[in-house]
Structures are given as structure tokens and as C-alpha cells.
Image (cartoon, coloured by chain):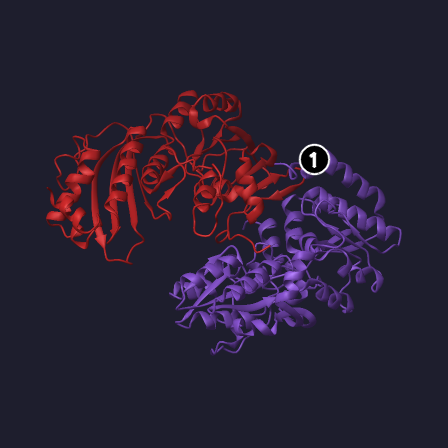
Chain colours: A red, B purple
Amino acid sequence: MSTLERNHSMSEGKILLAHGSGGKLSHDLVREILLPRFSNPFLEPLDDSARITNQEGPLAFTTDSYVINPLFFPGGDIGKLAVCGTVNDLSMIGAVPSYLSLSLIIEEGFSIELLKRIMSSVRDTAEEASISIVTGDTKVVEHGAADQLFITTSGIGWIRKGVHLSGLHARPGDMVLVSGFLGDHEIAVLSQREGFGFQGDLRSDCAPLNGLVGRMLEVCPDLRCLRDPTRGGLATTLNEIASRSRVGIALEEAKIPVRESVRGTCELLGLDPLYLANEGKLIAICPPQEAENILAAMRAHPLGTHAEIIGQVTEENPKRVTLQTLIGGHRVLDMLTGAQYPRIC
Amino acid sequence: MKFIDEFRNKEIAQGLIRRIFEVSTRPVHLMEVCGTHTVSFFRYGIREMLPKHIRLLSGPGCPVCVTPNQDIDLAIALSRRDDVLLATFGDMMRVPGSTSSLQKEKAEGRRIRIVYSPLEALRLAKENPEKKVVFLAVGFETTSPAIATTLLQAHTEGIPNLHFLNSQKRVPPALRALLESEKVQIHGLILPGHVCTILGREPFEFISKEFNRPAVIAGFEPLDLLQAVWMLVNQIEKEQASVENQYTRVVRDQGNPVAVRKMEQAFEQDEALWRGLGWIPGSGCRLKDPFSSMDARRIEVDVEPSREHPGCLCGEILQAVRTPPECPLFKTVCHPDHPVGPCMVSIEGACFTYFKFQHNPD
């Protein structure tokens, strides 16, 4: 019987401070929970760093931390999110995501069973995204010093030849596309939080977008800009692009895809779906003549079935996003300021 | 979405706008009493589609905005007591008190929880019997029945540790005070559909009978608002004054008697302090005697002397005497990231709404 299994039976399978001490228990944690799931030639030597063979072209490098509450939500969990988030950040500048690091900060007393489930989810998502976890770290902190489990992933990938995606590249006349329904992730997570008691079949859209991006770049290598509208949602992301490219962006509200259940929840709580976080959606800005081809390629991919052309880049109203409303009026779509709190009445 | 999409129909909206243009000849000031109406007017871009001489002014109908500093300061002081767990609606978190806010206090480690229903405060009280759970009871007649129900249930179940910091407000007495004020120049009122769902039409009849102003109870979708504006303009052009109900699919003349009864069982009318408007007779409610032990104002606590930013025009904005851009602090000293008054915090506050929808990049 391994130390971990003995410990499992002794303390109902909880992570102890000793699991982060660097001693035998730390060793067991790595050997018994992490290595069997992520085994690959880069990780297995267990040296202090992974050795990676250089490839041609510019390297993309990104990092992100995941502190979501609750850890499990319909359609995903913190592990899946930690892989998708970093894979998507690499994908948005046209890189092929290749290698990932995985760092865990675990609160003392965390369930070993849950940790295993989350690590299996990391493994499954990494496989789906064809990315290898090549290095990592675990720390255990005292009870109360962290909220159950925090994950940091960093990723590297090589940018495809001839691809220059940037928030600086939007030009008047370009078209704005979105890959599907907005707001699913934030509402799915919100519905699980204490006190909401919402029931429904809404699931987070959490997904690795590298496959979809690959297809889009095959069809149109001169795409101008890709972004994944995570925190702050569509409105905030488009404001950033408008501001950095010094252009206006004009959207048509009627074209923006939002699921009925998300719209309904937003109506009830006084939230705006255009500011809700997504974890498996992208916004693309492309030359006008390419828009229909890209739209067809997106719709042919499972993660872009509900893609739509939602607006156009304009010379007018520079650094501003405007919206033609459902009834034909116009208004400014501003950045999100502060957190969206549900209203009183 | 059923019962929503029908009321966002572009062709019907354009038709209503045409009709408003046909009938409207004179400059009018219309007050949308409710903050949700203000947001809807902006959100659908309706303001700019109307004739220029129809001026829409926001009223006092945002419960966060009319909560006086004194009550925020008291809530903050209570949260600093080790034996208190404060439960509040989310919109109150960022509202600035005299020197702090609940959000800042939470960051300092005070026990402050956001709840989505007053009944959650009751649950918190049951789960934390060693704490005094104080619910910051803010809201108009729309929210009051739920607060009353919670209070009555806690009393029936004998839950000793749930307390209410009552800052609820009543809408009709505030409208009376506004109409009595000489400063306020409004020709017609768009009445809050949700408050009227509870109270019905009768409590608002005084607007036409005593003050000779037309009023329309309105829903919150673009077609509701356009129809309400058209109905008001029609009355004004014909020099009529009556309280009409546009929101017939929801609001009944007698309101919701069950909800009203709950409120009457729990609370009695009292004078209340409104931010910017001062004390208004009959516009508040206090816990009835059998429930006085649940009144959080009886918990002993030191409250700092309340003060407000001298330049803040919240009071005049809530009375529709000024609009947010007329305030010298608007967008400069007062910004959603560092708000001076609650009108810049609440998602239905007039200042926040003007800021959000009329923001010009530098």
C-alpha cells in the first residue's frame, strides 16, 4: 500500500500540508495522481525543466490563473477551464498550442478524490486540444489560505507562418463575426452559486478553440483579429479592439446570438448578455470579401455551428462600439465598469 | 422569448414613433419614475427616436439611489460588530457611505453576504444561530412583500437572530412630495409598472385628481414605453389628465391584494428620509410592534456622523430638476469606478445610466 493510499484511509482522503512538504507525500502525489494522467516524454524525466525542441517561427507564450467557484459547474470544471483558457489565449494570436505547464495551489484538507477528478478532466481536455503538459508544480497551503484549489497554466505554441492577428489590425469595412451563443458560461456558473436555485439544462461553453481557429486560418490566412470574449464579454472585448485599432464598430443587436435560457435569466436578474463571460467562443474580424467563406467554415465546425456575422468596422465613431437596437434605435455599447450585480427590482 | 419578443417588434415600434410625431406639437417634460424605465429608454435607443421637444427626465425610482447615507453608515457600523453577519442585495455593496462602503468593509474581513432574496437571510440566520443576521432591507413596494413574508415567517418559526435594517420606501407619497414642490416641472408621469403590479392604480389617482397631471402605468419593453409616451402626449395635447394603464397584461386595477396584506401585516407607514429629498411623511415603513425585537436599529452600535459630498446633485437629479450631465462631478470626480453617490453605482441609477450609454471616449 502506498503512502497516499494509507493516508487516504487514515484521513478520509484529504490533502495534508505534508503533501506540499517536498517529502514522501509530495512524491506520492506526483507519482500517483499527476504522472499517470499526463505521462509524456517531456514530463517523464521529472527534471527541473522540460526540454523542448525549437520549431520555426515566432513563439507564443501565455499564462493564466484559475480561481473559479464552484470548482464544478455544468459543462466543465476548473481543470477543463485551466486548459481551455490557455489553449484559447494561444489560439487567438494564431499559434498552434503545443506545451502547457500546470501549477496547483491546494488548500489543506482538499479531497483527494476531487483532485483526481479534476486532474482527469485536465488530461481529457489536453488530449482534446492535442497539447502536452510538460512541467508543473504543486503547493499545499494552510486551511483558509486558499479557496480549495487554484490552478495556473502557462502555454507555448508556434505562430503559423504568414499569420498576423492583432487587436491593432481592424480596418473600416471589415466584418465582425462571433462563433456562437454568448453568455452560456457565466450563467451556467452563476446558476450553481449559493442561493440561486435556478434549474435548467444550460451548460458552460468551455472548450478548446484551436481546432476551430485552425480551420478558419486555412480558409482565410489574412484574418485581422481573433479574440475570445471571456471576462467582460463581447462588449468589453470589442471596445478594446475599437480603441486599439482606432476604429468604430457597429453591431446589429438582432444578429447577436444569445440562447433563450440565457436571455431569460438576464431579463430576470437585470444582467446584459453582451457583458457575460464566455470560455469557448471567439470573435473574428476579417476583410469583407472573406466574411461569407469564413462564416461557412465556422458553421461547418462543431464549435461554430451557430456562428453569425454581427457587425462591421467603421470609420465613424472611432474608439467606440455602437449598437443598432432591435427596434432600430442606436446606442453606445460601453466597456463593463465594475462587476455586474443582479438588481433589486 | 415569449411575452418579450412581441414587445420588441421593430415595425410596430416604428409605427408608434410615427404616431407620436403626428400627435405631438408642444414641448413636454415627462418623468420616468422608475430606474428600470430610464435604462430601457437608453438601452433601446428610444430617446433619440422621439421628437426633440419631448424631454425625458429620471425620477426617484431607484431604491439604491434614495437610500440615505445615514442608513449605509449604520449598515457599515453594524457589519463591524463581531457578532453581526450582514446580508444585502448586491447593488448595495458599492454604494458609498460617508467614509466607507460595504464592499470595502468586506475586503477588511467583515461578514457581509450578497443575497438574491430576503429568504436567504432567513436561511443564513438558521445556519448561524450564534450571529445576529442583519438584512439590509432596501426596496420599494416591489420588494416589500418578499421582505414582509420573510419577516412573518421568521416570527412564526421563532427565529430570534434575524434582524431587519429597514430602509424600505413607498412610492406614492414621494410622488406627492415631488408634485407639491415648485421646483419640479413635469407635464406627465410614466408610472412604475412593477410597483403598480403590487399597489394597483388607485394609490396613484391623486396625480390626476389633485395635481391635474396625466400619468400612464407602463411596462418595460420598448413597445410598452413607446405606447406610454404616445398615451401621455395624447392626453397632454388634449389637455386631459387621467391615470391610464398601458401595462394591462400585468397590472390589475386592484393590484395584488395578497402582497399588500403581507406588507400591512408586517409594517406600518412612517416618515422616511430619502437621499436628496429629505423627510417625506408616510413614505417609509417601520416594523409593527410585535416584531420590534427584529429591528436592527435597536442593536447598539457607534455610527460615524454622516456627511455627503457638497457638490453632489443627486437630490436634484432624483427630483428631475437637473440631469446627470449638469452635475459638476459627473464623469470627473464621480465615476462608476469611484462613485460619489449611489446614482453612479446602481445599474438603474440615473447617473450610471447616462454614463454607460452616453460615454464618450477621450
Quarter of the picture containing the N terminus of chain A is: top left
Q: Is residue A155 above or below residue B157?
A: above
For image coordinates 45% across by 46% down, the residue present is: A190
Q: Is residue B293 left or right of residue B275?
A: left
Q: Is residue B258 above or below residue A282?
A: below
In the image, residue B75 lies at what x, y percent? Answer: 50, 69
Q: State the residue in front, A295 or A58.
A: A295
Chain letter of disc 1 in the image: B
Q: Is residue B237 above or below residue B160?
A: above
Residue furthest toward the right? B238
Residue A138 at x, y = what percent?
21, 47
- Secondary structure of the residue carrying tag 1 is helix
Q: Is residue B259 visible?
A: yes
Find disc 1 in the rendering and name its residue.
Answer: B10
Q: Which quadrant of the figure contains the C terminus of chain A?
A: bottom right
Q: Is residue A184 left or right of residue B184?
A: left
Residue type at mark 1? Lys
Report x, y in % for residue B104: 43, 64
The residue located at (65%, 48%) in the rendering is: B40
> Where residue A81 sits in the image (x, y, percent)?
35, 39
